[in-house]
Amino acid sequence: MTGTAAGDPVTWDDLHIGASAAPRVDAPLTITDFVRYQGASGDMNPIHHDPEFARRAGYEQPFSVGMLAAGRAASYVTDWLGPQNVRGFGVRFREQAWPGDVLTYTGRVSARREENGERLVDLEIGCTRQTGGEHLTAWATVVVGT
Amino acid sequence: MRVELGKVREFARATGSSHPEHIEGEHPVSPVTFLQTAAFWRTPANEALPAGRDMRRVLHASVEFVFPKGPPRAGTRLTGQQRIEKEWTKTGRRGGRLDFVLVVTDYTDEKGDLVAHVRNTTVVTAKPTGATA
């Protein structure tokens, strides 16, 4: 395991293939989390906060905004290796997450290389529900300065 | 669009980051997925998808961000232009039709240099998404 807290120096030597950050376990999701994200992002799809609209779409209640956990997965990466170092980040959405779900984020180094004088690591990021179901999978490419 | 200081802080908070590089100073680094806030700047002139899609039938499939020099800092003025790169159809597990669309947005700075390349794939389902799940 390598450093995890914001500001912890993580070096190129630390980031061998298979190196991982400590998992992050978030507090249970609330509709307030969805609303705060929707207000911040400008995505006002009512399926994430309007119970009647969600029912008309075939759901028992509103479900989480995929981009909320995507953003939190990105924060997990930037807390680990620094905001300005990210060169790429991608997410594939899997099963929906619901109010009360506890999401756990994990990350490990899957590849490393030098390109144009920069040292880059590729990361595999997971985000699973308390059921074990995958909410999303993500990847990131990050420059390592030291 | 202008990468705005207050918006960067608001977005960092909403996505669970308190990293000082997202918060401190006049020009903090914007969060990795911050360019989703371009929703506030879209107009018919720079938007690829028609407005008014039935949101009961839309799901987000994937998104990718590429930053040649890292995410833009607050204060940067960006110009974004969307285009539809690809459209395709699949049959879902329950036999329903799934219409995928990949929308690509390139963001350039005042000098015309590419700052970010964003790829968003959404799906439109035949029925409301909860009925097909």
Image (tube, helix red, strand yellow):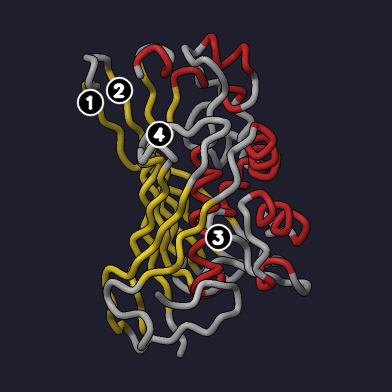
As shown in the figure, which amino acid type bears the numbered disc 4?
Thr
- As measured in the structure, the alpha-carbon distance from the residue carrying label 4 to the one carrying label 3 is 23 Å
The secondary structure type at the circle numbered 1 is strand
The crowd level at tag 1 (other Cα within 10 Å; few <14, some 14-19, many 20+) is few
As shown in the figure, which amino acid type bears the numbered disc 2?
Leu
As shown in the figure, which amino acid type bears the numbered disc 3?
Ser
> Upstream in the sequence, badge 2 or badge 1?
1
Location of mark 3 (residue): A75
- As measured in the structure, the alpha-carbon distance from the residue carrying label 2 to the one carrying label 1 is 5 Å
- As measured in the structure, the alpha-carbon distance from the residue carrying label 2 to the one carrying label 4 is 10 Å
Q: Which residue is drawn at 45% across and 90% down?
A: A146
Q: Mark 2 lies on which chain?
A: B
Q: Which residue is drawn at 25% across and 26% down?
A: B89
Which disc number belongs to residue B122?
4
Residue A132: x %, y % from top left:
36, 41
The crowd level at tag 3 (other Cα within 10 Å; few <14, some 14-19, many 20+) is many
Q: Which residue is drawn at 75% across and 61% down?
A: B5
Q: Nearer the viewer, residue A124 or A133?
A: A133
| Mark 2 vs mark 3: in front | 3
Q: Which residue is drawn at 39% across and 54% down?
A: A90
Q: Which chain carries label 4?
A: B
Give the quarter of the figure containing the N terminus of chain A: bottom left
